[in-house]
């Protein structure tokens, strides 16, 4: 009975940590809600697809234009943890530094398994799908990079749209897929790593209590579980950090994270911190090629994405790019909106004021 009580105590401490971790994640989400419209720059053909389908396509992070996506945050977290003072540095944090990269890199996970770092976990699969917005409604760099070289549009979304984005699924799940809202931070900003330091400090007491308890009672398995829980809790923050070279984008993001952990005891896969994304919302599209048939990207042209339903009432304006005739484009956009039964004045259609030719 004594052993059972100790096991229950360790499990209670882990659940206490999970509750606190979720609260912190929700705070990070709500603190990033903008106070003004955010804009998605895209081509005219993508605008038609968004309006007609009433959905956004969240792209898998490995297919974005920054090859250091997530990797930068991984390196930063390693540095923060390395310099993080704790009386349990040797028996918890050093091991955590070895475990965390395994969630992001399958080769590192397999190597760690051979060293018995994951004795109960069979496999880990992490997928992050993201959709980007810009703070500026008429931003020349964004027109060049994402707005069809000035021939596209900037779709303006109201601030309330960026509050918690939960998509209910079938069944009685209380952890629906969740589009996380975050303002991107760049590594030339002062105190760039303070965000991660803050999260480690907020969970410190619960972590220390459990590490101390497990150390005294030789419950090493619970320490491994806590390290995995902490890693998966920090993962949603990883897509919010980018290299300073992209600072001109002035980016905000909505993104999904699906962290699937498969145990070797035959239990059903475990998803943390949210339930799995329904398969019917997942799809794959082909990246365009050049006229010569040469594939443009340096990654697989098959791009996984997630369909994210929207309400057209959340769109407040559509800004037309500087390299096209405004009157002609406005006429076509009005036709597009009228087919959806939208009030002509409900969504403002405005021209770019930039002087730019494609």
Image (cartoon, rainbow, N blue to C red):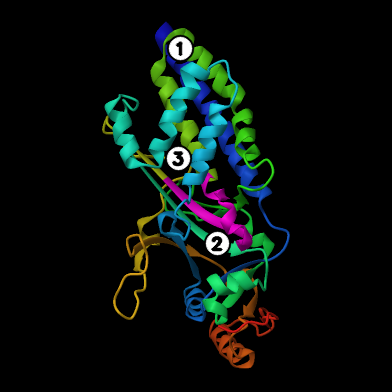
* Contact, mark 1 vs mark 2 (Cβ under 8 Å): no
Q: How many residues crowd around disc 3 within 10 Å: few (fewer than 14), some, or many (20 or more)?
A: some
Residue 313 seen in this snapshot: no
Sequence order check: which comes first, mark 3 or mark 1?
1
> What are the residue bounds of the magenta stretch?
238-258
Q: Nearer the viewer, mark 1 or mark 2?
A: 2
- Taking the image as drawn, is residue 249 in sight? yes
In this rendering, which labeled residue sits more in front, label 3 or label 2? 2
Q: Which residue is mark 2?
A: 132
**Residue 270, disc:** none
Q: Position of residue 282 (x, y in %)?
A: 38, 60
Q: Is residue 201 left or right of residue 4?
A: right
Q: Earlier in the sequence, mark 1 or mark 2?
A: 1
Q: Residue at x 41, y 31 (%)?
A: 99
Q: Nearer the viewer, residue 304 or 301?
A: 301
Q: Which residue is mark 1?
A: 6
At mark 3, the secondary structure is loop
């Amino acid at each position: 009975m004594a052993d059972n009580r100790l096991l229950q105590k360790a499990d209670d401490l882990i659940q206490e940590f999970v509750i606190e971790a979720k609260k912190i994640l929700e705070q990070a989400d709500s603190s990033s809600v903008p106070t003004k419209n955010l804009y998605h720059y895209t081509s005219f053909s993508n605008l038609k697809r968004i309006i007609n389908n009433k959905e956004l396509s969240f792209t898998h992070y490995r297919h974005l234009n920054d090859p250091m996506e997530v990797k930068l945050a991984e390196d930063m977290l390693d540095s923060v943890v390395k310099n993080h003072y704790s009386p349990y540095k040797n028996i918890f944090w050093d091991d955590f530094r070895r475990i965390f990269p395994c969630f992001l890199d399958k080769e590192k996970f397999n190597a760690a398994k051979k060293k018995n770092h994951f004795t109960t976990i069979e496999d880990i699969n992490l997928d992050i799908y993201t959709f980007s917005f810009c703070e500026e409604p008429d931003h020349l760099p964004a027109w060049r990079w994402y707005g069809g070289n000035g021939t596209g549009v900037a779709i303006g979304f109201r601030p309330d749209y960026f509050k918690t984005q939960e998509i209910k699924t079938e069944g009685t799940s209380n952890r629906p897929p969740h589009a996380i809202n975050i303002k991107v931070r760049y590594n030339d900003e002062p105190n760039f790593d303070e965000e991660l330091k803050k999260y480690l400090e907020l969970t410190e007491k619960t972590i220390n209590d459990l590490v101390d308890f497990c150390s005294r009672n030789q419950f090493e398995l619970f320490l491994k579980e806590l390290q995995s829980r902490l890693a998966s809790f920090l993962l949603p923050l990883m897509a919010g950090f980018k290299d300073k070279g992209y600072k001109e984008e002035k980016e905000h993001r909505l993104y999904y994270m699906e962290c699937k952990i498969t145990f070797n005891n035959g239990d059903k896969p475990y998803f943390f911190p949210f339930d799995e994304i329904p398969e019917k919302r997942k799809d794959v599209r082909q990246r365009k090629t050049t006229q010569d048939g040469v594939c443009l990207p340096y990654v697989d042209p098959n791009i996984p994405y997630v369909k994210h339903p929207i309400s057209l009432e959340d769109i407040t304006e559509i800004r037309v790019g500087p390299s096209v005739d405004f009157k002609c484009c406005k006429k076509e956009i009005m036709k597009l909106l009228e087919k959806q039964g939208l009030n002509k004045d409900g969504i403002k259609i405005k021209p770019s004021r930039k002087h730019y030719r494609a």
